[in-house]
Image (tube, helix red, strand yellow):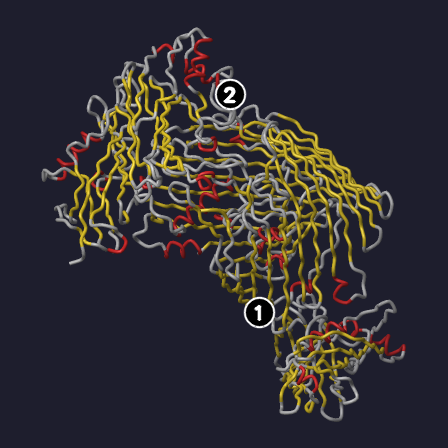
Amino acid sequence: MSSTALARSAAVLLALVAGCGSDFDSRTLIKDFRILAMQTSPPWFVRGEEAVTRVLTAGEPRGTTAPTYRWSWCLLRGSNDQGFACLLTPELMNQYLEARGLPALLPSSDLGTNPTASLSLDIPPEVFENEEDTGFCSLLRSPDGPLGEISRFVTLPDCNGTYPISFEVQIRDGDRTLYGFTSQNYVYDPRVELNAQPDISALDIRVVDRVGNPLEQPLEFEKSYLFELSNDEGLGEDRTRTEQLQRLSETFSSTTSPNAPRQHEQLSLSWFSTTGDWDAPRTGYLPSNFVNDAGEVFDREAQIQEWVDARTNELELPKPAELDGTSFDVTIVIRDGRGGLSWVTKTFDIGASQ
Amino acid sequence: MKKLLPLLLASTLPTNALAQDEEIEEAEIVELPSIIEGAEAVYPPLALRQRIAADVVLEVEISETGTISDALVVRTTTIAETLSATVAAAYGIVRSSTIADYGFGDAALSAVRKMRFSPAKVEGGIPIPVRVPYTYGFELPPLRPLPPPRTEGEAGPGVVAIRGTLRERGTRSLIPGAIVTVFQDDGTDVRAFEATSDATGRFEFFDLAPGDWKIQGEAEGYFPIRDTLQVVVGEITEVTYYMEKGSYNAYDVIVTADRVKREVNRRTLTREEIRTVPGTLGDPILVVENLPGVARPPTGGGQIIVRGSGTNDTRVYIDGVEVPLIYHFGGLKSVLPIDVVESVDFYPGNFSAYYGRGTGGVFDAHIRQLDPDQIHGTVEASVLDVSMFLEAPLTDELAVAVGGRRSVIGDIIKGVVPEDASVGVISAPVYYDGQILSNWRPAKGHDVRLFFLASDDTLELLFDNPAAASTQLTSNNVNTAINFQRATLEYRYAPSERYQNTLLVAGGRNFISFNAFQFGFQLESLQFILRDTARYKVDDALTLRFGLDLQTSLTDVNANLPGSPPVEGQTGSNPDLSDTLDSNIEDSVNTEAAVFLDAEWSLTEKLKLFPGLRVDYFELVKQWSLDPRFVARYDFSDQFALKGGVGVVFQSPLPNQVLRPFGNPDAGLQRGIQYSLGTEFKMPEGLGLFSRLEWDLTFFYKDLSDFIAASNRLYTDGEPLYVDNTGVGRVYGLEAFIEHKFENNFRGWISYTLSRSERRDTPNSEWRAFDFDQTHILNMVMSYSLPESWEVGLRFRFVSGNPYTPSLTVQTGDSYFQNDFDSYANVPGASNSDRLPFFSQLDLRVEKGWVFPAFQLKAFLSLINTLNRQNQEGFTRNYNFTLEDTAQGLPVIPNLGLRAEF
């Protein structure tokens, strides 16, 4: 990296500090029809298992007819400057696998036009990796492989017992198309520990005061409120944190080694509402330590974002003239950083200032 | 000494009322202007020595407020005083018959501009502007009586009565060679004695009778001093006089010998020229943005773009030693303060074989030669930074200087960031630099110079919620530290006019640390540079130059980055931050060595050829290169010359473009072939203001091949190579430069570049514009010195907008949601296929100086983008990249400062 590039980066940071920007709507404000999240269940799927992908949308569609869906899947997707084109389709990969004497078992890339899409793969592990280095992963990295014919830059996935499958949804809404992309791990190595969705079954969105006591509705215009993703049981802070985190943020190991250290998933919460302005568009929980199977705790460099901060956010409500109606929706999308995703939505009443 | 001839406004002389409107034009002038406040001209020293008087007829325009709004010299009539041969011999007066201009005109103009008049008036007492003739007479003072001749055998000087020192007002510089005279006139007898100040500015008078003595001192280029001193028996009257210079305008004393022009284009800017150019904050590197061939970098870019080339293609040297970092943060200031700089040379192309390794241009800043007669220095404080510079003679042969600078703008930024901002400024962006200079001339023909430069930039920010920026960030700290130190020892040995050798040894350390969230880049490098250049004059027609240019480094690199840095023309994407490229390199040695030979060959008096050859070895890519260069120049006359050149330059890829995992180990040298053809023209004498005009017109073409471009190829490990030598490019256009040298208090230039720079990244891809292809680049720089030490200047820039890559998401309204990163992506169109609007900017600079006996004080105000024009530098886009707004450059930026020179 050149020194001028570093200087440029510093200048950008300075601009950020100075608060330069334009008056666009915040990404947290739901007005137009849009995609908020895509969820595949289960988040990591194994041989023969069906993975169902659905999309969380919000807002009023633009078109006069209901939005239409088209789903597909892909083995390797290009970056944004390639228009996210599928660079390695299952059909093309089947041809290469056949040429190498491997079974061409990949189903069609077309996953239909329903609001959800299902995919099931039945591919033996040796198709991905084998001792002869003739498998899928070796083929990807071979100058003689299918990528040799693919122009321009591409980031190759790692093959560590899993392979990221890319799903695409195209939602046609009036004169525009909303594209959504998500990648989910297909687990071909049975030793790999599977991931689960963040469990939010016991959690709800509440409005609380500064000490955590619930506030009654309706909420008032032009005031700021603290919203919290929490349970309803009146538990103490320590217990709340532990129980919530056990459900939301699993511990995992980055390798298949049995003695590998384990760490909590890094959670992020995306906050959306149909009115108002959130203090932060997204909050996060960054675990401060990781634990191995023997129960040993390893300190990380710094504890940056606590769960108590990640699960709360402040919403500034608008003037009455800026809201059409007497209620608004709040949606929180939780990601575990490894493909697991859940969301929760709740409607709140809003009334005139007292 | 001088006599004002108020021949003003005799009714017989034509007097023109300057038309303001019809009514006034027809009105009769009832009251003519008269002098309210006169001004004395500095008698031209040479004319004074040769006893030449003169009448200068001027045409002056007196405004309705009585100030001089315009003046020009109509004619000058010189009158040589009639002297007998005996008197001329006694006073040492020798007249030259070849001197045509003693400088009476300029001296008269300078004085008249300081005068104030009552305005001309028409009926009803209405003041009006008029243009009138005015004659300024230079009358010789009477010859000073000669001191009585000493009789043979008379003893030397006896008792000192008056002892004095002459210094220059404002700088305290000693004034040698001044003539000091003391008079005593009791009504019947006149006694006078004369002395000359010695090298230390001192003078003495001996054995003066007690009483009052009038004393007068005169020195070339200074206003005389007059005083009365009392001599008391048994006491020494000691005095120090500060003589005021005729002009404190630095341009008046800039004397630059013409160097041989061995390149097609070389622009040289001196320290004082640089310091006062508006809009560039007195910076020796920023100022070259105003020269032809140099593109405008985007605000805060801190880049040097020459003839459309990439930002890494231009080499920056300090006295032949390449520097790793040119600018402090954001490109506000370069790492080299103006006080240590003598001049800056800029070569947009076709440079000599002395330079290489860069297919763009060359900047070479020359450190000042120290020659102080005593301690001198400067202290400057402005909104941007504070600096000081101090130079002192240690012995007759040895002088040293130290300087330093610290930014203050970062403290201001830190102060205005609100406490509840989402970004905490832990350490304000701050830069330092320091310099040590030393000159040692142990003997004739031996010149040793030492220069030490250190620079440091630091910044630290803390984000309280990094998740807001990305779901994948695992740290909230961003910090940078960039510093380098460089020591250069230069030994110049010139035993004769025919032979000269310059040995230059430099060493230093570069350190770069950039940490952003969980990513980081640390580089520490020890540098060693050796240059030796021998110059041998074979005869009057041929001079040879041979040199060695070696630089080697020992480098440690530790990098952990989310992908390979983009190359020219690549747009950004949302990288997977969990997938990083790591590299840990220790003790990596990289050597670049070159030998070169070139010649200055005067085939005829008018035709000069400059052939050259350079051989380089690049250890990074393990390749040799052979760079032939050739420049020819034909001087048709003193006014007109034709010149042209062709040369080959090879350039190494950047280290990250070669080293795994960021680059391609097979990447090789990039080649540029530079062509240029141009003319130089100096206006002939006798055209008034236009006589000081010089212009230069150069056509250029640059052929680029084997250029580094983005690649899809895979390395043997199956991972991407990222880059390849598949790019080609071409840059062509013309550069025009019209300069008005300093005369009549005015200096300025206009530079214009018309160019096209385009490239093709692979053989099958389309030609596209370079990132900084700017079709039109117009710069106008002017400065004007006013009476009372005021100086005003302006710079105006009008430049084509940079190419940019349009957004398809904005055009179609389609959005692209990446669930893995919880973010949207921009989908770019064809690379650099659209262009931002024109950029224009007006910068002003006003400076006021005060001259005190021991120092000068200057207050200056620079207004960058004075008209607050909203120039577009790019775009801001909404969260899903379907809407965009203009990202604007700097608003009006004032920089107020004070500078003391002593």
Answer with the quarter of the image where residue B779 lies: bottom right
Residue B298 percent across, percent down from the top left: 53, 48
The residue that appears at 24% across and 27% down in the rendered structure is A197
> Chain ID for label 2?
B
Amino acid tagged 2: Tyr
- Using the rendered image, report if marks 1 and 2 lie on a common chain: yes
Identify the residue under disc 1: B849
Residue type marked 1: Gly
Question: What residue is drawn where x is 22% and y is 50%?
Answer: A325
Q: Nearest the camera: A315 or B747?
A: A315
Mark 1 secondary-structure assignment: strand
Task: Note whether A299 is above or below B485 in the view shown.
Answer: above
| Numbered disc 2: secondary structure | loop
Nearest to viewer (mark 1 / mark 2): 2
Q: Which residue is mark 2?
A: B715
Q: Nearer the viewer, residue B372 or B316?
A: B316
